[in-house]
Image: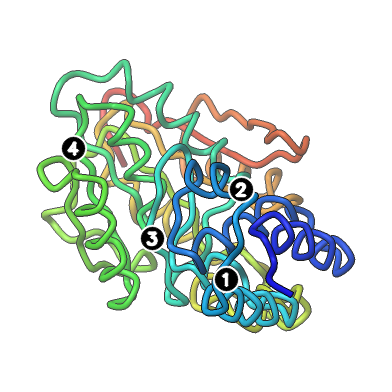
């Protein structure tokens, strides 16, 4: 018997809930929109209509893959972050709501900067952080810095997709090494580095461990390798009084605060995310010169 779009949606939501998927309602809708080629408004309009056999077959195939653990963002090739719809592939991490706290701190600082302020998104991945800053702070010019060639390809796609080609540029760079001469004089550096301790990567949820790129997860033996390197080596890329803002793991804030203090940053602050985890640590390069 033919199924309506609403029948398919309700069946998928129930199956995803039973599988322990937290955002079952959202994911069921996104999968069905993708399978049918409909936007969200069209999907809601057509809920009572019968889906074609082709749409139902595509949808059930996608749902089966999701129930086996494959993240919905990789299945549909895009995801929303801070009001932006971004291209997402298995070469980059899926943007998460936790990271919006980092973006909010960056926007608060960047909006008070002069026209032409320079912002660096270091370990950019999909470019979600830097592009959200650029989209909300037209006074800035943003560099998306990433080591992975494949991730840089996604950055370029997202710059074009959002229409920020005049305001954002992708650059290949290794965050563990000192900045090249062209990457200096930044007012703001934002960094969401790999921060999972190496031995813990294999213990992550299968939807992360088996699908997301390990190069973007593995933060070294204690998870702090990138924080140490960036705080020390990239300080020279900040203007006097410029700010470095990190996203950190749920239990890493004290260690990252210490790393910033050890490297001479001032006005160190830590911010809670909506889940009440200390998610963002920031500090300023001292006025009057950078060591």
C-beta proximity under 8 Å, tags 2 and 4:
no
Q: If you read the primary sequence from the N terminus, does the residue marked by circle 1 or circle 4 appear first? A: 4
Question: Could you tell whether 114 is left or right of 144 in the image?
Answer: left
Give the mark toward the camera: 2 or 1.
1
Distance from the alpha carbon under mark 2 to that under mark 4: 27 Å
Categorize mark 4 by other alpha carbons within 10 Å: few (<14), some (14-19), many (20+).
Answer: many
Q: If you read the primary sequence from the N terminus, does the residue marked by circle 3 or circle 1 appear first? A: 3
Give the mark toward the camera: 4 or 3.
3
Q: Is residue 75 above or below residue 139?
A: below
Q: For mark 3, what is the residue?
A: 126
Q: If you read the primary sequence from the N terminus, does the residue marked by circle 2 or circle 4 appear first? A: 4
C-beta proximity under 8 Å, tags 1 and 4:
no
Q: Is residue 7 above or below residue 117?
A: below
Q: If you read the primary sequence from the N terminus, does the residue marked by circle 3 or circle 2 appear first? A: 3
Q: Quadrant of the C terminus?
A: top left
Residue 240 position within the rendered picture, expressed as x and y whole percent measured from the top left: 27, 29
Which element type, helix, strand or loop, lies under badge 3? loop
Distance from the alpha carbon under mark 2 to that under mark 1: 17 Å
Categorize mark 3 by other alpha carbons within 10 Å: few (<14), some (14-19), many (20+).
Answer: many
Distance from the alpha carbon under mark 4 to that under mark 3: 17 Å
Which element type, helix, strand or loop, lies under badge 1? loop
Q: If you read the primary sequence from the N terminus, does the residue marked by circle 2 or circle 1 appear first? A: 1
Distance from the alpha carbon under mark 3 to that under mark 2: 24 Å
Q: Residue at x 29, y 46 (%)?
A: 120
Q: For mark 4, what is the residue?
A: 141
Q: Which numbered dot is residue 256? A: 2
Q: For mark 1, what is the residue?
A: 217
Q: Nearer the viewer, residue 125 or 90?
A: 90
Determine the residue located farthest toward the front in the rendered image: 1
């Amino acid at each position: 018997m033919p199924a309506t779009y609403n029948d398919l949606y309700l069946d998928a939501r129930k199956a995803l809930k039973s599988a322990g998927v937290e955002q079952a309602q959202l994911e069921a809708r996104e999968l069905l929109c993708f399978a049918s080629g409909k936007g969200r408004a069209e999907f809601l309009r057509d809920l009572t209509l019968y889906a074609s056999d082709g749409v139902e077959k595509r949808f059930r195939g996608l749902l089966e893959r999701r129930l086996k653990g494959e993240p919905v963002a990789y299945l549909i090739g895009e995801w929303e972050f801070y009001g932006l719809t971004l291209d997402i592939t298995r070469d980059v991490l899926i943007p998460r709501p936790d990271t919006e706290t980092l973006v909010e701190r960056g926007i608060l600082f960047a909006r008070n900067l002069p026209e032409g302020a320079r912002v660096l998104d270091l370990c950019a991945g999909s470019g979600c952080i830097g592009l959200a800053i650029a989209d909300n702070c037209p006074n800035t010019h943003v560099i998306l810095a990433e080591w992975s060639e494949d991730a840089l390809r996604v950055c370029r796609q997202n710059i074009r997709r959002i229409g920020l080609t005049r305001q954002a540029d992708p650059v290949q760079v290794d965050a563990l090494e000192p900045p090249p001469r062209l990457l200096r004089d930044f007012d703001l550096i934002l960094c969401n580095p790999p921060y999972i301790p190496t031995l813990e990567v294999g213990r992550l949820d299968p939807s992360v461990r088996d699908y997301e790129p390990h190069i973007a997860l593995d933060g070294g033996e204690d998870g702090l390798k990138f924080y140490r390197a960036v705080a020390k080596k990239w300080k020279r890329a900040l203007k006097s009084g410029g700010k470095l803002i990190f996203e950190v793991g749920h239990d890493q804030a004290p260690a990252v605060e210490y790393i910033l203090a050890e490297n001479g940053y001032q006005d160190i602050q830590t911010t809670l995310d909506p889940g009440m985890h200390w998610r963002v640590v920031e500090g300023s390069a001292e006025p009057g010169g950078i060591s």
